[in-house]
Image: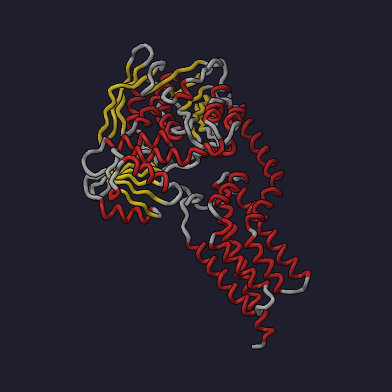
Amino acid sequence: MSYDTLYLVIAIIGLVAAAVDFDRVARRELMMFQQNSYRPERYSRWWKTAGESTNPGRLGALIALLLLLVRNIDFVMGAAIAIVILVVQAYSLTVKKYKKPLVMTRRAARIYSVMWIIALGASCGVGLGVMSLKWGLVAAVASVVLSPALLFIAYFLLKPVEAHINKKYYNEAAQMLRSMPDLKIIGVTGSYGKTSTKHYLQRILSEQFDTLMTPGSFNTTLGVIRTVREQLKPYNEVFIVEMGAKQPGDIKEICDLVHPTIGIVTAVGEQHLESFKTIENVQKTKFELVDALPADGLAVVNDDFPYAACRPVKNARCKRYAVRATDNAQFTAKDIQYTPHGTTFTIVGPDGKELTLTTRLVGECNISNLMAAAIVALELGVPEQKIRYAVEKIEQVEHRLNLKRSPGGITIIDDAFNSNPTGSRMALDVLAAMTGGKRIVITPGMIELGDRQEELNRELGVYIHGRADVAIIVGHYNREALLAGLEHSGMDSDKVYAVDSFNEAQRVLQSIAAPGDTVLYENDLPDTFK
C-alpha cells in the first residue's frame, strides 16, 4: 500500500473515530447540563468543582489533537495513535453506567443537533477550505476537546427558540386552567418533604375526588406546564402541584400560572444554599406560595422549622402544625409509636378533636408530611374514616425513608433520594430505634449547602455516633468532613469504613452484615458529584 493510500485510509478512519467520540462526549456533556437544569451558571460551577478541565477523557482528546498538530510527528503515525485514544475514550463512555442517564427530550435533542451541526460545519469547512483531510480531522478532534464550548454556543443560539416554544406551551397551559374554574389547585413546597407530602395528599384526596398531581419530580414551571398539557382532564377536581425552587422567583413563577388556593409549606431549611446563599432567601422563596394565595385561601405551615414558624401569614387563613415545636401550632401529634412494621400516632386539632392514624411509614418526617395532608383533606371535607383508610394503604415513596426487609433478614431503610441536615437526623433517629442487631449507615453526606457544606457534614458525622454502630462513608466529596465528625464524636475507627463507590460499600456491607441488622442508605449523590 502506497503512503498516499495509507494517508487516505488513516484520515478517513480518524474522522469516523472522532465522530463517534464526539457523539459520546456530546451526550455526556448534555447529560450533565440537563442534571444542572439547563442553567449555564450551575453547569459552569459543576465543571470547575468536578475538575472537568483535566479529566482523563479530555486530556486524552487534547493529546490526540497535539499528535496531529506537531510537525515533527509523521501524520500517519500521529493519527494512528490519536485514533487509538479516541476509540478507547468512546468505548469507555459507551459502557459507563450513570445513575441518571440523559433523557433525550425535545429540548435536549435540539441542543444535541446544533452541537453536531457546529462540529460538522467546522470539520467540513476547514477540510474543504484548505482541501486537506488532515485539517478536517484536526477540526473534528478539536470539536471533541471543545465540546463544552459547543454546548454553550448551542444553548445560546437556541435561547430565542426555547423562549418562543416555552411561551406557546405556557399560554396553552394557562388557557386550559382558565377553562376549569372549579378546579381546586393545591401547591406544595418546602426545602424537603414536598414530594412525599404530594403523594400522601393525592392518595387521601383520591378517596373523595378525582385528583391529579404533578408526577415524579416535575416541580418546575416547565414540568407543571407539561403536566397540564399532557395529563389534565376536564373531569379532574383537584390538581396537586409540587413547587421546587433553585433561586428566588421560581415558585412565584409557578403560582402565576396555576393560581393555587391552598398552599403547604413542609419545611424551610438549609437546602440549596449554594444557589440561595442564605436561609432567609430560602424562606422568602418558599413563602412565595403563601403570598400568592387569595384572601379566602388556606396556608398550611410546618412550625417545626423556625424559619417557617416565625414567618407571619396575613393574606390568607393559616393552619400551623408541628410534631416538636407545638407552642403556636393548631395541629400537633401525640402517642407516636414506631415498630418495624410502621407507625401509629394521633393528630390533635385546635378544638381538641383527635384523629388516630396507622401507617406503614416510619420517621418523624413522614408523620409531619401525613399531618399536612390530613389537614388539607379535612379542610376539603374528606370524612375521617376515608382518611384513616387511605393512610393505612399509603405506599412508601421510593428512596424516601422506605422500610423493607431483605431476603437475608436485614432491615433496609432507604433514604437515598437526597439528604439534608434535618432529614438526615430524622433518618438516623429511626435507625437508632432499631435495636435488634447492628445499625449500619451508608452515606456520601450532603450536598448543595454552600459555605456550610463542610460544617454541616462534620456535624452529620458527629450525629452518626450513638445512632449507628458502623458507618460506611462513600466517595470523596464529603469524606474529610464526615470522618472528622466521626473522629470528634469518639466513634471507634474500626467501625468506620471509607470507600470510593457504592459498589465497594456493598462489598463491605456483605462482609459485616448479619440477619437482624438494620442498614440506612442516607443519600446517593448524582453523577455530577464524585
Q: Which of the 4 quarters of the picture holds residue 330?
A: top left
Q: Residue at x 56, y 45 (%)?
A: 36
In the rendered image, residue 264, in percent from the top left (x then y), is placed at 48, 25
Residue 397 visible to an observer of this rendering = no
Q: Nearer the viewer, residue 457 or 29?
A: 457
For residue 392, side relative to residue 4 (left or right): left
Q: Please, which colouring scheme is shown? A: secondary structure
Q: Residue at x 74, y 70 (%)?
A: 127
Q: Nearer the viewer, residue 482 or 291?
A: 482
Depicted 379 relative to depicted 217: above or below:
above
Residue 490 visible to an observer of this rendering = yes
Depicted 316 relative to depicted 510: above or below:
above
In the rendered image, residue 274, in percent from the top left (x then y), is placed at 54, 39
Q: Quadrant of the N terminus?
A: bottom right
Depicted 44 relative to depicted 217: above or below:
below
For residue 505, side relative to residue 6 (left or right): left
